[in-house]
């Protein structure tokens, strides 16, 4: 137990939550990217690890709560000899902690934090930052369809998750979900579930099949706190050419279909949440979005948001907002107005609130905030990035000039294209580099695809750190990725049957949400 | 933006002032080497190299690597490298990749020359 005790203290000092999250995330993404055949297995492994780590962290904090430290940082039930002179030392040994004492949700406590409370708050803030990095706001347009999502997190780290994944030139997968609990458990589970989704969605099938596969993975984990209430999830696959949406839900609040000027109608999609019953089957609903029509997903935090008198926001108010949503009001503005309105009621939020809207653009609807997209395909030869960079810069100045990100974006896209042409396609002019950019209200997304085998970002980083440039000719190697690391808000590398893709996200500095 | 690099070199008493126009990328090395073989030093006892990037609109990681190699050669061949006229964005990138360990950044030629005069007078 002495070793375990030291490990626990070391992990705490190093910011255990943050380090575990990042390590798990990096390992998971890497596995998903480079082991495409076993991506689901990799995701399941990561999920199991995340669930285990969440359990460990929650138990650790329960112990801390049961054994608060005194004024000088020592435990009130007696000093640990190893901790002498170490004011930051925590609880000594896992073996002496009472099992199952108190709540598993330290962040959900209503009383004042005692003992290690400041440290707990600091670690939760770190977890919150990591979670925000994983889930940048969505502003995506493909064809005539647009996907917008906004999420406001509770004062604790919450469990809402959302995503929009472009599967090919015609299909977007959208997702909104909620994992059980808040705090550390949620912080661990959300990235793992996003990984699982991204792995599974690329294996094909409809949303009901997708939910079935994810359900079997989650049910097989028997994770603490998961099998009791499960994960709620709503998944839609949108064909942007036809406007056809295939939707399936797992215990998630029923989504709405809204045509401006008409009453909103709810889609029935009742079923058990994921992870509770491995045999559960899910039902798929297929419909076609008419021009101007909106499909609205949300989490329970939106309708359960309580005012100062404890009264819930409720479905009636949400439906009134949906019914009054003007045809020319952009989704981002509508969502931010609704969320701001809830916050103006003055109470602190106990749960995350997430909204995701899919709409087919019609006529003048949304024209004020019309999003733009652009595609290029260039042969792989030295300097091929320059024409893309120049056209992109002009496009930015015309349409996104107030973002403050033009230079960062142009630099990153140029570096990604150069890497793709040189390292991905080996400057083989017969091979092309495909570049796709989407400008949203508050976010710009760029994907750069090549036909090569791809690379492992972590491997590149560690190789560079292990072998700093001795030879002058080595200068510049790896700098492209370093600049992308530094200048993007978020980026990932993925691979599918069409090749390798670097996907970069940039938030507008003027409209961050 | 296929803008080939052009260079204009103006010698002064203690060094060389080089104005670059165009793109600074992997294709730039050959062009610079054709007019300035930096690995052999600046010649005639010159100890200062000013690179004016005011008219360089595009610099990628290969271009930054080239600047570092030029500046590192200066340490071996006893000349100091000054970069002036670069935008705030590229100054940020220079710091990110460590170029500022080897070069001094100045807003323009005039500021760089003032610093050189101060160095020459032992200040």
Image (cartoon, rainbow, N blue to C red):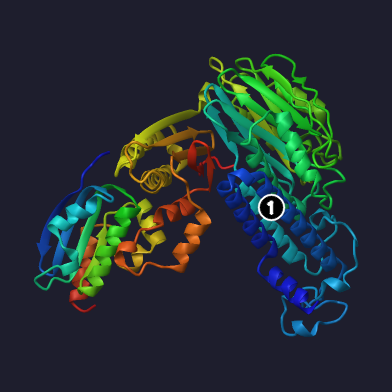
User: In the displayed structure, does residue B50 sit left or right of residue A26?
Assistant: left
Classify residue A307 by image quadrant: top right
Q: Using a 10 Å C-alpha cutoff, classify the residue at mark 1 as few (fewer than 14 neighbours), some (14 to 19) or many (20 or more).
A: many
Q: Position of residue A225 (x, y in %)?
A: 84, 50
Q: Nearer the viewer, residue A337 or A262?
A: A262
Is B95 located above or below residue B89 in the figure? Answer: below
Instruction: State the residue at coordinates (41%, 57%).
Output: A478
Residue at the front extreme of this rendering: A37
Q: Is residue A59 above or below residue A283?
A: below
B40 up-or-down from A86: above or below: above
Q: Is residue A345 visible?
A: no
Q: Position of residue A178 (x, y in %)?
A: 76, 41
Where is mark 1, residue-wise?
A46
User: Which residue is located at x 79 percent, y 56 percent?
Assistant: A107
Quadrant containing the N terminus of chain B in the rendered view:
top left
Left or right of A18, for residue A252: right
Instruction: Please tell me which residue lies in front, B123 or A293.
Output: A293
Residue A313, compared with residue A512, is above or below; it is above
Screen quadrant of the C terminus of chain B: bottom left
Say whether residue A487 is visible.
Answer: yes
Circle count: 1
Query: Which of A328 and A46 lies nearest the eye of the viewer?
Result: A46
Element assignment for label 1: helix
Left or right position of A96 against B13: right
When asked about the image quadrant of residue A335, the answer is top right
């Amino acid at each position: 137990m002495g070793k375990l005790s030291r490990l626990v203290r070391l992990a705490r000092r190093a910011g255990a939550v943050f380090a575990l999250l990042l390590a798990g995330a990096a390992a998971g993404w890497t596995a998903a990217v480079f082991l495409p055949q076993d991506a689901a297995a990799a995701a399941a492994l990561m999920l199991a690890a995340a669930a285990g780590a969440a359990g460990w962290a929650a138990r650790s904090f329960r112990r801390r709560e049961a054994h608060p430290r005194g004024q000088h940082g020592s435990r009130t039930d007696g000093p640990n000899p190893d901790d002498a002179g170490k004011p930051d030392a925590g609880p000594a040994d896992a073996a002496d902690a009472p099992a199952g004492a108190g709540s598993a949700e330290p962040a959900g406590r209503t009383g004042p934090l005692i003992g290690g409370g400041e440290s707990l708050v600091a670690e939760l803030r770190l977890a919150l930052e990591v979670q925000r990095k994983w889930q940048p706001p969505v502003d995506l347009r493909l064809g005539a369809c647009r996907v917008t999502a906004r999420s406001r997190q509770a004062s604790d780290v919450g469990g809402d998750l959302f995503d929009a994944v472009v599967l090919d030139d015609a299909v977007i997968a959208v997702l909104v979900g909620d994992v059980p609990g808040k705090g550390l458990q949620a912080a661990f589970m959300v990235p793992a579930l996003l990984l699982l989704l991204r792995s599974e969605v690329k294996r094909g099938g409809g949303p009901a099949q997708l939910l079935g596969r994810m359900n079997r993975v989650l049910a097989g984990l028997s994770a603490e706190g998961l099998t009791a209430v499960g994960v709620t999830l709503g998944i839609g696959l949108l064909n942007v050419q036809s406007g056809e949406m295939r939707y399936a839900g797992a215990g998630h609040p029923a989504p709405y279909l809204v045509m401006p000027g008409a009453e909103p109608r709810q889609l029935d999609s009742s079923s058990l949440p994921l992870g509770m019953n491995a045999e559960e089957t899910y039902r798929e609903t297929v419909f076609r979005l008419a021009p101007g029509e909106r499909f609205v997903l949300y989490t329970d935090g939106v309708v359960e948001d309580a005012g100062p008198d404890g009264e819930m926001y409720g479905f009636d108010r949400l439906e009134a907002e949906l019914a009054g949503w003007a045809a020319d009001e952009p989704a981002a503005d509508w969502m931010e107005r609704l969320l701001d309105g809830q916050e103006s009621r003055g109470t602190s939020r106990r749960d995350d609130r997430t909204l995701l809207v899919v709409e087919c653009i019609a006529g003048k609807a949304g024209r004020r905030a019309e999003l733009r997209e652009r595609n290029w395909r260039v042969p792989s030869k030295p300097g091929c990035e320059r024409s893309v960079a120049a056209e992109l810069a002009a496009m930015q100045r015309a349409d996104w000039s107030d973002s403050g990100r033009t230079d960062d974006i142009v630099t990153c896209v140029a570096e990604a294209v150069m890497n793709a042409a040189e390292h991905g396609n080996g400057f083989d002019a017969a091979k092309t580099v495909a570049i796709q950019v989407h400008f949203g209200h508050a976010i710009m997304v760029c994907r750069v695809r090549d036909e090569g085998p791809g690379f492992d970002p972590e491997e590149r980083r560690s190789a560079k750190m292990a072998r700093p440039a001795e030879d002058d000719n080595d200068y510049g190697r790896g700098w492209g990725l370093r600049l992308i690391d530094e200048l993007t808000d978020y980026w990932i590398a993925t691979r599918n049957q069409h090749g390798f893709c670097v996907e970069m996200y940039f938030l507008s500095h003027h409209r961050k949400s | 933006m296929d803008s080939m690099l052009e260079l204009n070199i103006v010698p002064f008493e203690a060094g060389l002032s080089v104005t670059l126009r165009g793109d600074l990328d992997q294709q730039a090395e050959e062009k610079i080497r054709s007019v300035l073989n930096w690995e052999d030093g600046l010649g005639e006892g010159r100890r200062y190299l000013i690179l004016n990037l005011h008219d360089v609109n595009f610099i990628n990681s290969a271009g930054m690597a080239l600047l570092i190699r030029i500046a590192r050669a200066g340490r071996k061949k006893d000349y100091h490298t000054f970069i002036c006229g670069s935008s705030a964005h590229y100054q940020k990138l220079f710091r990110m990749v460590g170029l500022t360990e080897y070069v001094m950044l100045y807003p323009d030629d005039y500021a760089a020359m003032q610093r050189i005069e101060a160095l020459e007078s032992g200040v």
